[in-house]
Image (cartoon, helix red, strand yellow):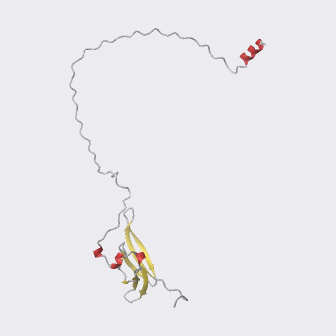
Amino acid sequence: MLMVFLFLAVHCGGGTAPPPVVPTKKAPAAEKKTLPVPPVAEKKEVVKQEEPEFAYNPAGKPDPFKPFIQLTPEKTRPSSFLTPLQKYDLSQLKLVAIIALPEGNVALVEDQQGKGFMIKKGTAIGRRDGKVKTILKDRVVIEEAYSDIFGQAKVNEISLFLHRPEEGGES
């Protein structure tokens, strides 16, 4: 039985036997050699060359502390030079009437308290330097000039519509 066990152990091990370990001989300790210390020589003064100071020249380079897109604030105007219509935002005004004249149409706008103002073509109106561009039979077109984020001049057209009372309503 011992023979069968040894036979199976040798042939069924599943791999090759590890190579035998060969002891290595250590080399004799190397003799330490002492190097002669050179005599201390006279110290020479080391002359340092002065380097020129660094100077940054920002010419042609963007300022890293400024934003890429410059948002321009709204123009501030002294209130003493504004007309009463320039003190209102366009959303606070209501178109009440349009009068057709041979010289050109005239419109009546009203503020929230009911105070009325007559406007014609070219009248300055609104807080954003708007001007009346044209007065048609059912609306007033106002142009507001502004600068976009790239600094280009743009024009915004805003229309105030005339609201007519519905038929069959109040008399």
Quadrant of the image occupied by residue 10 = top right
Count of labels shown?
A: 0
Residue furthest to the bottom: 171
Residue at 42%, 74% in the rendered image: 157
Quadrant of image for the N terminus: top right
Percent coordinates x, y for residue 57 in the rendering: 28, 47
144 up-or-down from 60: above or below: below
45 up-or-down from 8: above or below: below
Residue furthest to the front: 113
Percent coordinates x, y for residue 31 in the rendering: 40, 9
On screen, residue 52 versus residue 167, left or right, reads: left
Percent coordinates x, y for residue 138 in the rendering: 46, 83
Nearer-the-camera pick, 41 or 157: 41
Percent coordinates x, y for residue 122 in the rendering: 35, 80
On screen, residue 113 versus residue 166, left or right, reads: left
On screen, residue 11 versus residue 108, left or right, reads: right
13 up-or-down from 50: above or below: above
Quadrant of the image occupied by residue 134 = bottom left
Residue at 33%, 79% in the rendered image: 84
Nearer-the-camera pick, 83 or 107: 83
On screen, residue 30 versus residue 16, left or right, reads: left
